[in-house]
Amino acid sequence: MISLNKENILLLLSQIPDPEIPVITITELGVIRDVLFNADEIEIKITPTYSGCPAMKQMEDDIKSTLKKNGFEKIKLTTVYSPPWTTDWLSAEAKEKLRAYGIAPPEHSTQDKSWLSGKHKTVHCPRCKSSHTKLISQFGSTACKALYQCKDCLEPFDYFKCI
Amino acid sequence: MNKELFKYTLRLADNALVLGQRLSEWTGHGPFLEEDLALTNIALDTFGTATSLLEYASRVEGADRNEDSLAYFRNEREFYNTLLVEQANGDYAKTIVRQVLVDAFNVLLYTELSKSKDETLSGIAQKAIKEVTYHYRHTSSWVIRFGDGTEESNKKAQEALNELWRFTGELFEMDEVEEELIKKGIAVDLKALQPKWEKQIDELLKKAILKKPENSFMQTGGKKGIHTEHLGFLLAEMQTLPRMLPNAKW
Ligand SMILES: [Zn+2]
């Protein structure tokens, strides 16, 4: 049995892939906000990426089954909303994994609000790195993505939106 | 139970739930694939906010109802959404015009609600504001495309605006529920949002070469549970399955 401390629990959780983008883990995604040890249970605080993200339920099930497999029976999952999830929490390493997988990672910090008012930012093609790309659709295959196309290599690609 | 907080949270939740249900009617019927995806995604975000709010309402109530029972086992007169969000989809211009009026309102509403002294409402609002801002960006660009497009698209957007305008006054209506909670720093002062909303809509309509309708008679009642003929049909479709099979799990 693995000893009860936060690092060990986080280590277990860091082996769980994101259900929709399996090249990054749920800890890299930043949805795990805290691990607490209550009287007889482990409490995992999670935050949703998007309010209605259908993958959250899958992540909750994966967290429970992973911990149970490692001998932890009493698990409580609590959803926290504040501070709200942001793509700023994705590490440089996680962003590189997204790019290698064919998803253009978020290009800028959300501290820069100009995109909200419609200012277009350059998004680089994850395949040929060209900056010569165009927005096809503001909404993509999942809540977190928009659809772009590269004007040089002509490949369409998903862009992980900055929020 | 804090009765005002329960009702206030339900009103917020019902606006999101009913609008999400309306938008989801477009799933598989969008004018083209990208717009089908857009409305489905907007519906999904909206349902997410509704779920968080209904879950909180059930905790505030402290009875044996959870978010699902609040969504599926309340009748029409127990829904407190504004009349605007229950209006039928109509054509694509009407859906987009309805949505832009609500999105512009929601950006302002959630910005203020994120400062609420109620931590849960503030947290849900902080989350929602990012999403509704993105929605507004999308729907406002469509309003401009319709208004400043062809004669036909301008006509359809203008007709939708003329038809829906009479439901916009209710967005800013307040009663003792809000007044009580404003004193406690929990609720948003909707009256204070109105000039900001009007300014934003004015600017958008100018860009879209659409005419702002007269502020004449405003329809009201939704916040008190008195609805237009549309809500009953919407609920019938939304609630039929859980009512036929109340303990179904999937
Ligand atoms: Zn390329």
Image (tube, helix red, strand yellow):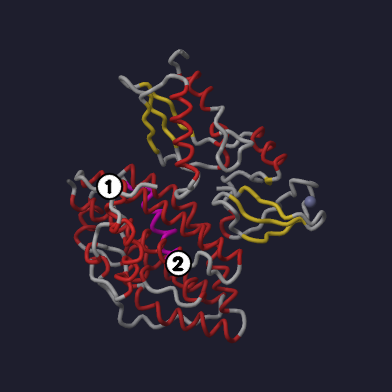
**Residue A57, magenta (yes or no):** no
Give the residue type at disc 1: Asn
Q: What element carries label 1?
A: loop
- When the figure is inspected, residue B219 is found, relative to residue A75, above or below; the finding is below
Which residue is depicted at the point 32% across and 61% down? B239
Residues A162 and B210: in front is A162
Principal SS element in the magenta part?
A: helix
Residues B185 and B79: in front is B79
Instruction: Identify the chain of the residue marked 2, using the numbered disc in the image.
Output: B
Instruction: Identify the chain of the residue marked 1, using the numbered disc in the image.
Output: B
Q: Is mark 2 within 8 Å of ligand 1?
A: no
Res A155 → quadrant: bottom right
Q: Does the residue labelled 1 lie within 8 Å of ligand 1?
A: no
Circle on res. A45: none
Residue B148 lies left or right of residue B203; in this view the side is right
Mark 2, other Cα within 10 Å: few <14 / some 14–19 / many ≥20: some
Mark 1, other Cα within 10 Å: few <14 / some 14–19 / many ≥20: some
**Residue B113, magenta (yes or no):** yes
Give the residue type at disc 2: Glu
What range of the chain is rendered magenta?
Answer: B99-116
Q: Determine which residue is flagged by label 2.
A: B25
Count of numbered marks? 2
- When the figure is inspected, residue B121 is found, relative to residue B18, above or below; the finding is above
Where residue A38 sits: x, y (%)? 33, 22
Where residue B240 sits: x, y (%)? 32, 62
Residue A144 lies left or right of residue B179; in this view the side is right
Circle on res. B66: 1
Where residue B84 sits: x, y (%)? 36, 71
Residues A131 and B88: in front is B88
Which residue is depicted at the point 72% across and 39% down? A100
